[in-house]
Image: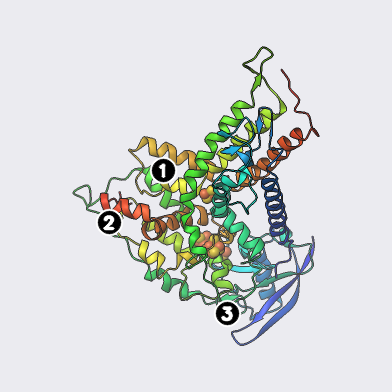
Amino acid sequence: MRKDAWWIQPLFVFSVFTAFVVYSTWAAFQGAFYWHENLLSPFYSPEIWGASEHALWQRTGTPGWWPGFLPYSPAFLILWAPVSFRLTCYYYRGAYYKAYWPGPPSCSVGVPREAYIGERKFPLIVQNLHRYALPFALLLLVFLTIDAWNSFRFDAAGGGKEFGLSVGSFVLTLNVVFLSAYTFGCHSLRHLVGGGMDVLSGRPVRRKAYECVSCLNARHMAFAWTSLLWVAFSDIYVRLCAMDVWTNVRFF
Amino acid sequence: MKSATFKVWRGDREAGDFQTYEVELEPGYVVLDAIHKIQAEQANDLACRWNCKAGKCGSCSAEINGSPRLMCMTRVEDVAGNGPITVEPMRTFPVIKDLVTDVSWNYEVKASIQKMTPREPDFEDGSWKMHQYDVERPQEFRKCIECFLCQNVCHVLRDHQMHGEFAGPRHFVFAAQAEMNPIDLTDRIPQLREELGIGYCNITKCCTKVCPESITITDNAIIPLKERVVDRSYDPLTKLVRRIFGRSDKG
Ligand code: SF4
Ligand code: SF4
Ligand code: FES
Ligand code: FES
């Protein structure tokens, strides 16, 4: 038996992950207080159909094709993308198998069990399609970059826009930085840009790309957690500003 | 620290139990020193396997306080201070006697992995031209000392005893070393998926954590191989592209 406090790590993963899932589900169902002036919550970005000035189609109410018996929130249209990306992420897989399943709860603290199929058969064989979630995750980064850019642009006194800086600008910029560091460190991307080949010498572009992705990949766990916590914080920040609990302090 | 209490597992395939020994310590003692001292002074018949005492032969693998480690690379002061120090044989392999286990299954698996087929030599003397950059990737895997600590800790072998269907991390490292070699032409991807059972690995990274050679087993060997298996077996798009352009990951 291991004598050290091996349970701390799975307990941490379990608590933080559960808290995140509960909070983000709650936040997605709100359908309100997700924007404040030039700030848009990352859970709602891109806002495809919604009431705010950030929406691609700015409409109040529910899209006509939306099943009437379901509640509507602009978050529902996009959250499947980051959710499927993170659920099938190689790092998170290893972490949540330990924390939730638990198989095994921690290294060399196993419970001997009979049936084990790993990722060879349904359902977990689906994890192998992680790469299909990647393009959507990359696309989201584009929208989040636009949101970060917008957080620096304020309504000018005489109409039009002017450049400015607020706490929210930092929040949304860091959000896209952390999420990019996480997404560009993806194992599937690493394979795609060059890891799948045995010879990279003489292919300067691939080689550089492989090196960049590998560099972020080595810190994939760290960025997985920072980006997860920061995206939740970004939503909280925008939400509390929208509810007038916090003020988005503007420096200039 | 003057002395330490060791609980050492003694027994054979049939039965066994922990025996307690009090050991006088000298500065810089590693667990293997303590075991040798017990052997010399208190239990002449205590069996343990070792060779180099330098973390290079991979013989002295054991479980110290329940964690898989090399006895010769574990300083006593680092594992003391939490009651007696337990030392037991690796749990995943059958015990021969005391701390010595039968790891021969590993050699059988290794022998079953498809060998390298080098492409035509580039020069008349039968040698090849390779770029150091491309060789570095498989070179990481050559550091393996075959201590089998990664095999021991992997829950697929340890808890589920799937020795027949799953080759284990050490052998994915070995397969990756050949598979990623720039002059190799063998295609091991079907073997990795079928006989070697790479899909049983659920990337919990315990193997990487215990590797005394700090080989990035999961991230650099297993996941890249899994991605190649996905290319070949699970991803309809890559399969299609391959069929049309006849592309391969070789070269
Ligand atoms: S990462 Fe895979 S091979 Fe390594 S210990 Fe975990 S299940 Fe076993
Ligand atoms: S990969 Fe590391 S832990 Fe596994 S046998 Fe080789 S040296 Fe030991
Ligand atoms: S492996 Fe983590 S995002 Fe792809
Ligand atoms: S005795 Fe050689 S590795 Fe420990």
Q: Position of residue A6 (x, y in %)?
A: 71, 61
Amino acid type at circle 2 is: Pro
The one of A11 and A80 positioned closer to us in this rendering:
A80
Left-right relation of A16 to A213: right
Q: Earlier in the sequence, mark 2 or mark 3?
A: 3
Q: Mark 2 points at which residue?
A: B118
Is the residue at mark 2 from the same chain as the one at mark 3? Answer: yes
* Res A176 seen here: yes
Q: Which residue is drawn at 54% across and 41% down?
A: A216
Indicate the quadrant containing the N terminus of chain B: top left, top right, bottom left or bottom right. Answer: bottom right
The one of B68 and B40 positioned closer to us in this rendering:
B68
Amino acid type at circle 1 is: Val
User: What subunit carries mark 2?
Assistant: B
* Res B57 seen here: no
Amino acid type at circle 3 is: Val
Q: How crowded is mark 2: few (under 14 residues within 10 Å), some or many (20 or more)?
A: some
Q: How crowded is mark 3: few (under 14 residues within 10 Å), some or many (20 or more)?
A: many
What is the spatial separation of the Cα atoms under label 3 and label 1, in whole angstroms? 46 Å
Q: What's the mark number on residue A193?
A: 1
| Closer mark to the observer between disc 2 and disc 3 | 2
User: What subunit carries mark 1?
Assistant: A
Q: Which residue is drawn at 66% across and 37% down?
A: A41
What is the spatial separation of the Cα atoms under label 2 and label 1, in whole angstroms? 25 Å
